[in-house]
Amino acid sequence: MAFVNHATKTLAIKVVYYGPGLSGKTTNLRYIYSRLDENSRGELVCLETDTERTLFFDLLPVKAGLIKDYKVHFQLLTVPGQVFYEASRRSVLKGADGIIFVADSQAPLLDANLESFDEMRRYLYDYGIDLNLTPIVFQYNKRDLSNLIPVETFNNLINPRKLPHVEAIAINGVGVLDSLKLMAKMVVPIIKEKVFGEPRKEEAEVQLVEEKKGKKEPRPKEAKEKEAPVPEFVPLRVTKIKLKSSKDVEEELEKLAQEFASLKND
Ligand SMILES: Nc1nc2c(ncn2[C@@H]2O[C@H](COP(=O)(O)OP(=O)(O)OP(=O)(O)O)[C@@H](O)[C@H]2O)c(=O)[nH]1
Ligand SMILES: [Mg+2]
């Protein structure tokens, strides 16, 4: 459930990037960070191992306009994909308003994708969240590689509700902002209904993230014909925090979210 502060009129919507190890979750956040104006987003917090594998989570707060007179931001979070960080994955998923499932499209990784999806379903169930009522965007990533899992196979196996799916090349930014925009379209009407009791409309008016001027993300279809530019990842102001154990994750997340909300509430 979104974090609402009626006193400061701020609302945080939690969007979790879930998926197997190395599927490209952190790459999504890095790309979004590199493409957004610094007025539109906060610091990118990465908790990584020395080899850049996510340890607990990554967090990027992104402004998302107003709902009524409440300032809204998305808390974009990634889970660590490596199998042994299951406690962190579970903690990060708690209270998720929406999920972007980042699948690795390489054929040998089909089982890893299915296992990750099934694990996510179980964790949500444990938290009393019905997978069938949760907004999910399916991002089929690494479409630049060969020997790919066909999109229809993915959709049949993990997306029977025919929710939005995006073919992505996150490393080049293809499909990254599209995935986020689709998520915004799905989740904002639900939050409006839950928080303000506003009846859900088919087509929600969503004020989307502001992109840096002068650069345009290539559409996925064009990108297949033309190579997309690699985003500039440097200089990145990446904050690194040390946590003692995954038990600290929830506390740290809440603290960071509140810090961002109060900073941006000027
Ligand atoms: N070829 C290709 N490589 C990609 C793409 N997206 C990400 N990668 C690469 O895949 C590797 C893993 O990416 P990450 O974003 O760190 O993956 P992750 O899902 O955060 O991994 P964990 O934190 O371990 O769960 C990196 O070397 C990325 O550069 C893509 O679209 N195509
Ligand atoms: Mg990662």
Image (cartoon, rainbow, N blue to C red):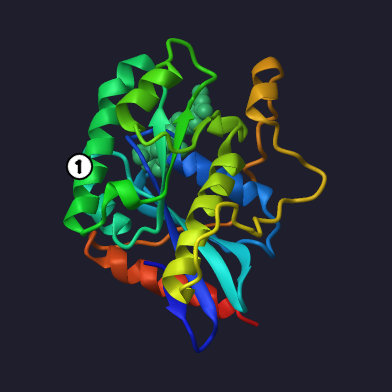
| Residue located at (66% from left, 31% from top) | 230
Taking depth in this image into account, of 201 and 118 the one nearest to the observer is: 201
The image shows residue 5, relative to residue 227, as above or below, that is below
Disc 1 beta carbon < 8 A from ligand 1?
no
Taking depth in this image into account, of 149 and 132 the one nearest to the observer is: 132
Residue 148 position, x and y percent, is: 43, 15
| Residue located at (42% from left, 22% from top) | 105
| Residue located at (35% from left, 69% from top) | 252
The image shows residue 202, relative to residue 195, as above or below, that is above
Q: Residue furthest right?
A: 214
The image shows residue 230, relative to residue 25, as above or below, that is above
Residue 227 position, x and y percent, is: 69, 21
Q: Is residue 62 left or right of residue 92?
A: right
Q: Quadrant of ligand 2?
A: top left
Residue 32 position, x and y percent, is: 59, 48
Dividing the picture into quarters, in which one does residue 152 lie? top left
SS label for mark 1: helix
The image shows residue 72, relative to residue 138, as above or below, that is below
Amino acid tagged 1 = Phe
Count up the numbered dots: 1
Residue 76 position, x and y percent, is: 47, 55
Q: Quadrant of the N terminus?
A: bottom left
Q: Is residue 203 left or right of residue 250?
A: right
Taking depth in this image into account, of 101 and 31 the one nearest to the observer is: 101
Q: Is residue 44 left or right of residue 250?
A: right
Dividing the picture into quarters, in which one does residue 240 lie? bottom left
Q: Quadrant of the C terminus?
A: bottom right
- The residue pinned by badge 1 equals 84
